[in-house]
Image (tube, rainbow, N blue to C red):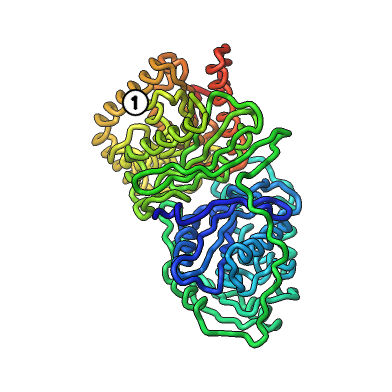
Amino acid sequence: MSGIEAMRPLYLAADPTPVFAVLHPATGHVRERAVLLCPPFGWEEICSARSRRAWSERLAADGHSTLRFDLPGTGDSAGTPEDPDLVAAWIGATTSAAAWLRAASGCPTIVAVGIGLGGLIAARALDAGAPIDELVLWGVPARGRTLTRELRAFSRLQASELPQGDDPLPDGALVVAGHLLSAGTVAALDALDLETSVRSPSRALLLGREGMQVDPSLRPALERLGTDVRVADGPGFGAMMSEPHDARPPLVVFDTVASWLLGDFRAADRRSVPAGDPPPELRTLELTVAGAGVRETPVLVEQPFGSLFGVLAEPAGPQATVCVVLLNAGAITHIGPNRMWVEIARRWAARGVPVLRLDIGGIGESDGPSDAWSDDASFYVPEFVDEARAALDVLQTRGLGPRFVLGGLCSGAHWSLHGALRDERVTGALMINPRALMWDRWAITVALMGRLRALHSAHDGRGAARAAPSRSSVALRAAIRRLLLFLVRPWERARARHLDRAFDQLRDTGKSALVCFTGDEPLYQQFERDGRLTRLGRWPDLEIDLIAATPDTHTLRPLRMQREVHASLDSAIARELQRGAGAPVVPSAARRAATP
């Protein structure tokens, strides 16, 4: 049985905002405790996604039915980061999810396992009547302002690494690794304080993390209300929150929590909290976007190793004959970088265009091994193109198409191009910040050359020197760059000819392509060296769009950049609709030959 076959994706009509959730039913000897797994926020949510799935599978195998869910305004749940009263919606969703889990599992005891923000919300949900009997809190502060202070420091650090010029935020708002917290949400988080709680669980396990002990205020805040508290180390937090392709499950913590859950502790006055009426389970998520109806549905694509997972956003009314499929950005899940794929899918479904956001094998919710992503080459295997094409087969059986557009960032851009080259149904490719469109092992060397070139120039966004490097370091970098250039230049020319022929094939088969770069991308520099930007007349339906000349923006973290990429993709999809309708195609305003 595949991982997806052993779990059940669903939607809950949580109060006040519906949420996406995944149930992992208990197998083997069913225990009396069911587990509600509450996620962290933003980049930590994305990095830990695969680990949280693995944790849920482990808990289910140990006999604990486990439900994990996306908070409102995050992941695949309804809502946006700009929604008012978002913290109240998070607390309401956690309360609803706990009530549903108790009813669905039949377990008398609900244990909330919360990481970071998710743990703070779960603990606070007790005061709102959440039927949570026990808590496991990992990296959770006693006060919300402790969390927001940490987020502000991280946000300032990232802002210092970017050039000036991003749109200023409203007073009090934060952007953390590309994820927005509105001023109202920050203020509401600041006001959370577990020391003022009036309800507490019967027992709790508090876990520290590398370099940080458990918040010293947390244990007394729980014990004053009669909670039996245990404290333990939480090794593996950092590994779980590494870049998605490097993130690893915290197996030691899995064992620690498993032992605690099966402990013999029984509080003398333990009484389960009444659950109230559970929220209805929904087959589809019904949304209103820009005044139009949109429905979202989980989609499975069968493969020899199990199933791929995706979420299909469809218009409630008439739909276009073009369907868009958005692929993973490296190992980032199907929600896309900074949740951008969710925004694009819902926006275009409201305009009549179905959009599937898909997890390739081993990423996000899809089956397949996920322990090989530290090797760049693992992202560029031809099997991933076959998986994308299998998703097109499923969409066609649902009556979608017959024309498809593939899109993605980084390796997802690579898959989009090669899907267009290999499948006649694909009439367009949307490629954002591709590191390599023609891949082999030498591509790593070329990317390294680009980084060395950036280090050699060492400037900020305004061209001012960051620091005066020593003469020896400048000379060494220049020498290494010249050596690498000498070694790979013949191969680079051959690969450039191969890419030109690929663009020729798209042109000759009437297919369109957008290549969108944001900043100092090595492949854009290669386009310049190859003279491709001066030969764009050869490919009338190829757009090269340079969004900005800023460093280290590969995953689109600045909000201004996100908006510009949205606009670039919107224009490309609109042109594809014009092509399909036989209408004259309006030329793009893309900066096709701009140079940083």
| Residue 343 picture quarter | top right
The quarter in which the N terminus is drawn is bottom left
Amino acid type at mark 1 = Leu
| Residue 468 position within the rendered picture, expressed as x and y whole percent measured from the top left | 46, 47
Name the residue located 50 percent from the left edge and 22 percent from the top edge: 592
Name the residue located 46 percent from the left edge and 72 percent from the top edge: 29
Name the residue located 60 percent from the left edge and 54 percent from the top edge: 70
Q: How many marks?
A: 1
- Of residues 199 and 416, the one nearer the viewer is 199
Residue 455 in sight: no
Name the residue located 24 percent from the left edge and 29 percent from the top edge: 490
| Residue 89 picture quarter | bottom right
Outermost residue on the bottom side: it is: 268
| Residue 401 position within the rendered picture, expressed as x and y whole percent measured from the top left | 50, 26
| Residue 21 position within the rendered picture, expressed as x and y whole percent measured from the top left | 58, 54
- Of residues 236 and 293, the one nearer the viewer is 293
Residue 471 in sight: yes
**Seen in the image, is 113 located left or right of residue 520?**
right
- Of residues 532 and 273, the one nearer the viewer is 273
**Seen in the image, is 257 located left or right of residue 319?**
left
Q: Is residue 564 above or below residue 470?
A: above
| Residue 224 position within the rendered picture, expressed as x and y whole percent measured from the top left | 70, 83
Label 1 neighbour load within 10 Å: few <14, some 14-19, many 20+:
some
Q: Secondary structure at mark 1?
A: helix
Residue at image mark 1: 499
